[in-house]
Amino acid sequence: MRTVSPAMPTTGTATIEVGKAFVPKVHIKADVLKMFTGPTTVRFATMNVVINGPDAVRIADNQAAGMFTIGHIHGE
C-alpha cells in the first residue's frame, strides 16, 4: 500500500475559492498505463498473478510514481 499526494493543478492562482453552500469536488485522473510502465515494467508473461509479495510492491511503486493526478476541482 502506498499513499500518494498528487500535485494540485496550477491555474494561475494559489487559492481555490469554494462557495459557502457548496461541497468541493476533486476529479482524480488515473493513467492505468503507468501502473505497467512505471519504474518497473510489468510484463504479463512473468507477472500475471499478483496478490502480495515483491510483485505487488513493484506495482504499488509504479502506481505511486505518478499514476494519479488531479484533473480539476469544482468549487461552486
Image (cartoon, rainbow, N blue to C red):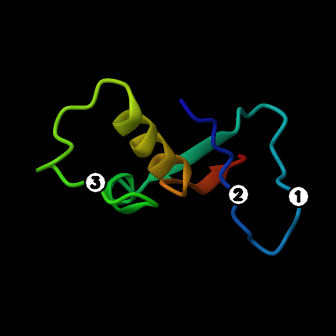
| Residue drawn at (88%, 63%) of the image | 14
Question: Label 3 to label 1, Cα distance in Å?
Answer: 39 Å
Please indicate whether residue 55 sits to the left or right of residue 46 in the image.
Answer: right
Task: List the residue tagged with mark 3.
Answer: 42
| Residue drawn at (71%, 32%) of the image | 23
Please indicate whether residue 12 sits to the left or right of residue 8 in the image.
Answer: right
Residue 22 placed where, x, y %? 73, 34
Dot placed on the residue nearer the N-terminal end, 3 or 1: 1
Q: Amino acid at mark 2?
A: Ala
Q: Which mark is residue 15?
A: 1
Question: Label 2 to label 1, Cα distance in Å?
Answer: 14 Å
| Residue drawn at (63%, 43%) of the image | 4
Query: Could you classify mark 1 by the number of other residues whose Cα lies within 10 Å: few (under 14), some (14-19), or many (20 or more)?
Result: few
Residue 13 placed where, x, y %? 85, 69
Task: List the residue tagged with mark 2.
Answer: 7
Q: Residue 3 occupies which quadrant of the picture?
A: top right
Q: Secondary structure at mark 3?
A: loop
Dot placed on the residue nearer the N-terminal end, 2 or 1: 2
Q: Amino acid at mark 1?
A: Thr
Q: Residue 48 occupies which quadrant of the picture?
A: top left
